[in-house]
Amino acid sequence: MAPEQVRGDGELVDHRADIYSFGCVLYEMITGRPPFTATQLPRAHLEHPPIPPVHFVPDLPELASDILLQALAKDPTKRPASASQLVRDLRQVLNRTF
């Protein structure tokens, strides 16, 4: 759940909550682990930043790691504007590198 959902901020819940969830899925696909462990939930979604993905995948470009972390921003206004923008940004960085 996105932080705004955990807090119960109904007026802040919109498509950006889905971007947060999508960011969680992408994080796990790339690192092989979820951004937070089960013992940390749901508090971690509110208070703790995830470990940067590059920590688990050292050859992941730093920019790709930053894009994933942006999708997991606690503040929904700091997330990508859309899921397609998130995918485009990641694809652009990863296509240049791999």
Image (tube, rainbow, N blue to C red):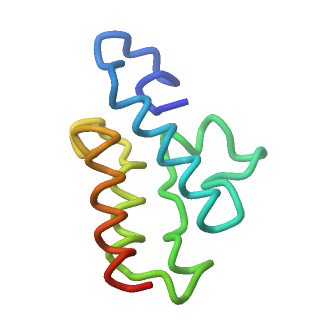
Where does residue 56 sit, x and y in percent of width and height? 62, 78
Q: Is residue 15 above or below residue 51?
A: above
Coordinates of residue 42 in the picture (x, y in percent): 63, 35
For the N terminus, the quadrant is: top right
Is 15 located above or below residue 20 in the figure?
A: above
Q: Residue at x 38, y 49 (%)?
A: 71
Identify the residue at horizontal 77%, vertical 44% (top origin). Answer: 38
Q: Nearer the viewer, residue 51 or 95?
A: 95
Is 2 located above or below residue 87 in the figure?
A: above
Q: Residue at x 30, y 19 (%)?
A: 12
Q: Which image quadrant for residue 84? A: top left
Q: Is residue 1 left or right of residue 40?
A: left
Residue farthest top in this picture: 10
Residue nearer the viewer, 92 or 47: 92
Extreme bottom residue here? 59
Q: Position of residue 59 (x, y in %)?
A: 52, 89
